[in-house]
Each structure stands twice: as C-alpha cells, then as structure tokens.
Image (cartoon, rainbow, N blue to C red):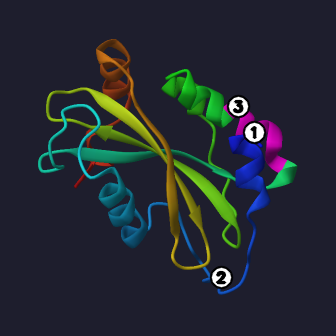
Amino acid sequence: MGLLDRLLGRKSHAGVEAGYRPADAEMLELVWRQLRVCPICGEEFAGHRYTLLATTALAARNRRNIERFLAAVEQRTPAGLDGFHDWDAAGENAEAYALRCPDGNIAIAVAHSAAAPPHFKNVIRCDSLGSERSRGLDAKVSGERWGTL
C-alpha cells in the first residue's frame, strides 16, 4: 500500500473540533518536536523561521490534487504548491511548511493533520530545496509571512 492509500485510509471524525484551521500552534509545536533539529543545518530551531505554503484535504474525492501536491513536494518545486489552499475543517489534511534556516536554505516539511485532537498525526516528509530553489522561494514569500520558531 502506497503513502497516498495509507493517508486516505485513515478517517475518523470522532472528537472533531469546530473551526480547526491550518497552522494550529499546538500542532506546529509537535511538528518541530518530531523533526527535533533542522534538516539543513542539524541544529536546534533557534533563529529559524517558517511559513505555511499550502494545504490540501486528504479525501478520496481529492485524490488527483493530493497526487499533484505530493509530487510538487517530492520534486522540490515550491511553485507547484501554488493554488493549494483547500481544507477540510472536519477531516484530515496535509499542510506544507517552508522551514528557513539562518543560512538562507529552506526545507519543505509536510505534516498530516486532523480536526480531531491531537491535530498533529505525523510529518509525511521533509526535504531541503537546495540553495537555488531556496533563494527563489525566499524572494517570493513576503517578510511578514515568516513566523519565528
């Protein structure tokens, strides 16, 4: 069974919190805790920044979008994530975050989240963009969108 099939096979609406939104503070804390250290520099996250790039609902009806979303992450093409803003407030979702290291390089971390607590399920993948793509993404994301870890 592939990653997409495993993600689509886990559905539970028990204990859903009304109004759950992407980038929930508690969920983000658990993402960073699972990663433990920056995937680029190997250091703790002091001085690092992050921003939410994209979201997609993990629902069978959305299979084609999920495939495109995961392919953009796997191919390390952040521009391929443009336009992914669908969200299922009562279901499960994938959230793609850019994690900017103080050296300027950026990694993309994709978290599996759900409306039912605990919101954080796991980090699906986390990969460095490399310096050229990092510079391109950094130039595209406005300064006020970057949060501090």
Image location (x, y in percent) of residue 60 = 84, 52
Query: Which quadrant, please, contains the C terminus?
Result: bottom left
Query: Which quadrant, please, contains the N terminus?
Result: top right
Q: Mark 1 sits on what residue?
A: 65
Give the residue type at disc 3: Arg
In the image, 120: left or right of 40?
right
Query: Regarding mark 3 in the picture, which secondary structure is present there?
Result: helix
Give the residue type at disc 2: Val
Image location (x, y in percent) of residue 146 = 29, 46
Give the residue type at disc 1: Asn
Instruction: Confirm or deny contact between disc 1 and disc 3 (CB under 8 A).
Output: yes
Image location (x, y in percent) of residue 105 = 25, 26
Query: Regarding mark 2 in the picture, which secondary structure is present there?
Result: loop
Q: Quadrant of residue 100?
A: top left
Label 3 neighbour load within 10 Å: few <14, some 14-19, many 20+ = some
Per the image, is 3 magenta? Answer: no
Q: Residue furthest top?
A: 132
Residue in front for this viewpoint, 49 or 31? 31
Image location (x, y in percent) of residue 71 = 64, 28
Residue beneath the point at 19% across and 44% down? 48
Specify the segment rendered in magenta: 62-68
Residue beneath the point at 38% across and 23% down? 129
Q: Mark 2 sits on what residue?
A: 16
